[in-house]
Amino acid sequence: MEKLKILLVADGVLTNISGVLKVHYELKEEYEKQGHEVDVLDYSIVYPKGRTAFRKIFGVLPTVKFWNYLKSNAYKYDVIDANIWYIVYPKESFNFKGLLLARSHGMQPVYQLAENIKSFKETLTKEYSNIKFKTRLGNIYRSLQKEVGLKEFYASVKYADIIHCLNTEEYRYLLNYGISKKKLALIPNGLDDNIINAFNKEPINEKVNSLSFVGSWTLRKGIKDFDHIITLIRKRINIKDFYLLGGYYGEEHVKKDFDKKNQNLLKIVPSFRPEELSKYLKTCKVGLFPSYVEGFGLAVVEQLACGIPVVAYKVPGPTDILNNLDASLLIEPGNREAFAKKVIEILELNDIEYADLSERCKQESRKYLLSDISKRFLKLYRTKLN
């Protein structure tokens, strides 16, 4: 089998901790296991001295930095697999004759649809009205970045040979935009096989009425809905703990989003190694994921792998993951009452019913083994190159 030479173009400095960078990091490892040669073009190469706030505002755009690098190096590769907003020039301009793939980590135009959801729009309006002047300036800068990012997105879509979609909503959006099916590839993110295999072995006999959330502590993750949801659940059923995992913020910051009567439930773990997650989840019975904006939702897969059913808002990403498992786990965005009701329903299952649901969660997680997902990408590369 012919070995490929692949260049991954990443948004930031490659890491295996979390987020979009972790996806590229683990794909790199998986490709190399299969004998392919993989290089990385990230900020450590184009910004060797780091990217200060001054450079972000007045410096050269990353897209230009990457383009300049590619003009000297692109010819070495069979495949360039880049974040969707980073290759914004035709590949002929940097002398590349291989396959150019634009990889989705969440598409900005699809993200913007979430801002029209009533409850999320109200949250954003309320929060932005209370922010400090310095934060307002930051938001103006971020708004300008969004405009630039949107232009870069459409340029990437125009010049890529293949556009990767993470969820069916992205796929539909690009079809409606006028992109041919032949140019689109719908492939989910994957989770390291060792992680899924280890998590699948987690027993359920230690589980109690504890809840979990895995993800960043941001407005788009629905953090302003948690307190109301937890209050509704506690009116009907006793909750032991609520684990908030991987949000990066400490207790003082996170507790501000909860009423005092709910703060005693919180077990806050700002960061952890990927393999450590299961030890925090071992007593958790239901995962809560009221996110309004997602590209995919690996945190949902991680909890399913531990045998934990996840209740989520019906938005792109989680919808693709949970639809086949149990569509009733998906709640209309912003309907906190229905969300709490579904969590209570799961907590009230008898042991046999819960064990059956838990096992189905584990089996569903195995659809996202990274070894299988990487093979799908490699097959796509070869097919299009041929």
Image (cartoon, rainbow, N blue to C red):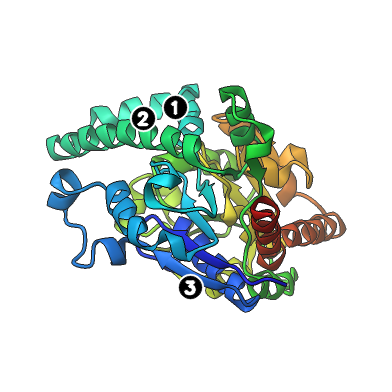
Residue designated by label 3: 273
Mark sitting earlier along the chain (3/1): 1
Q: Amino acid at mark 2?
A: Leu
Q: Is residue 185 left or right of residue 154?
A: right
Residue shown at the point (43%, 66%) measured from the top left? 40
**Foreground label between 1 and 2:** 1
Residue designated by label 1: 115
Residue designated by label 2: 124
Which residue is more in the foreground, 350 or 363? Answer: 363
Q: Which structural element holds mark 2?
A: helix
The answer to whether marks 3 and 1 mark residues whose Cβ atoms lie closer than 8 Å is: no
The answer to whether marks 1 and 2 mark residues whose Cβ atoms lie closer than 8 Å is: yes
Q: How far is the residue under mark 1 from the one under mark 2?
A: 8 Å
Which residue is more in the foreground, 154 or 100? Answer: 100
36 vs 359: above or below:
below
Which residue is more in the foreground, 373 or 180? Answer: 180
Please indicate, yes or no, whether residue 16 appears anywhere in the rendered image: no
- Binning the other alpha carbons within 10 Å of mark 2 as few (below 14), some (14 to 19) or many (20 upward) gives some
Residue shown at the point (35%, 37%) measured from the top left? 149
Please indicate, yes or no, whether residue 74 appears anywhere in the rendered image: yes
Q: Which structural element holds mark 1?
A: loop
